[in-house]
Amino acid sequence: MMVSKTVSSIVDIFITGGNELDTVTLNSICGGAFDNNLEIIPDGTVVTLRRGKITRKVTIRQGEGSECVANSLRVSRALARIFRLRNQTRFTFTFNTVTKTLTMCRKRVTADTLLLTANSRMLRDRVAIGLGIARKDGNYLRGGELITLRRGNIRKRLRFVLLTENDVFNNTFSLNPRVIRLLGLEANKRYRITYDQVKREYVFIRQVARS
């Protein structure tokens, strides 16, 4: 009897044009991603893609490795409608190596660690976030959109400034010094945080030692 083995990975959905229903492209080996567990799926494998009660057999095409910080699954607009998927949303994908089932579950909250820096030239209603840490945490907002920062019961809504759109390894997270004090935080310290895609909210949980 074969022993079932499952592996899981964080994957972001990207919707492309077209009506392809039988093939998806999985990019599972991003160098800056939290994990690369789904690289065990060979290119060309037929799997049962599952979300809740919705299932469909699709062929997995493994994308080439690239400089990126979040693994992704590219699906057609037609397949996205079947699975009720929205562009740039985050999921946990679990692959069963025996049944060849790839199950997706919505992952709205991502935990990470960041270095908080101060910039006295930054407007007090702004937060500047590098492309790298934004995408790694599932933040696909456009510059100028509102985002919430919270520590305990203290909340501050700010305008999001996206830094270096072409540098996927920019991990800057910068605030005006007065906003840092308002939130009860310290500059040049590392913090354990979570980012909620639905609420568009960063929560500062605790300070951690610098690595």
Image (cartoon, rainbow, N blue to C red):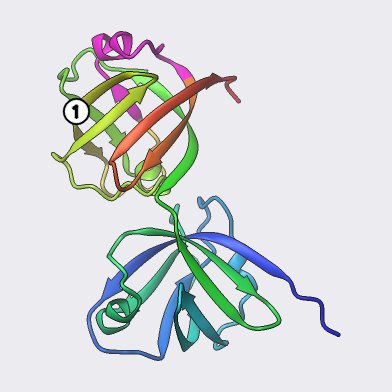
Q: Residue at x 49, y 80 (%)?
A: 49
Query: In this rendering, would 100 be left or right of 48?
Result: right
Residue 109 in the magenta stretch? The answer is no
* Towards the viewer: 88 or 68: 88
Above or below, comparing residue 146 to residue 57 in the picture: above
- Relative to the observer, which residue lies in front, 166 or 14? 14
Task: State the extent of the magenta-drawn residues as a range.
Answer: 173-189
Task: Answer whether residue 179 is visible to the viewer in this image.
Answer: yes
Residue name at image x 41 percent, y 11 percent: 186
Q: Position of residue 143 (x, y in %)?
A: 17, 42
Q: Which residue is mark 1?
A: 158
Q: Position of 140 compared to 188: left or right?
A: left
Q: x and y percent of residue 1 in the render? A: 86, 85
The quarter of the rendered structure image containing the C terminus is top right
Residue 95 position, x and y percent, is 61, 72
| Residue farthest to the front, as pictured | 53
Residue 103 x, y percent position in the rendering? 53, 72
Q: Quadrant of residue 79?
A: bottom left
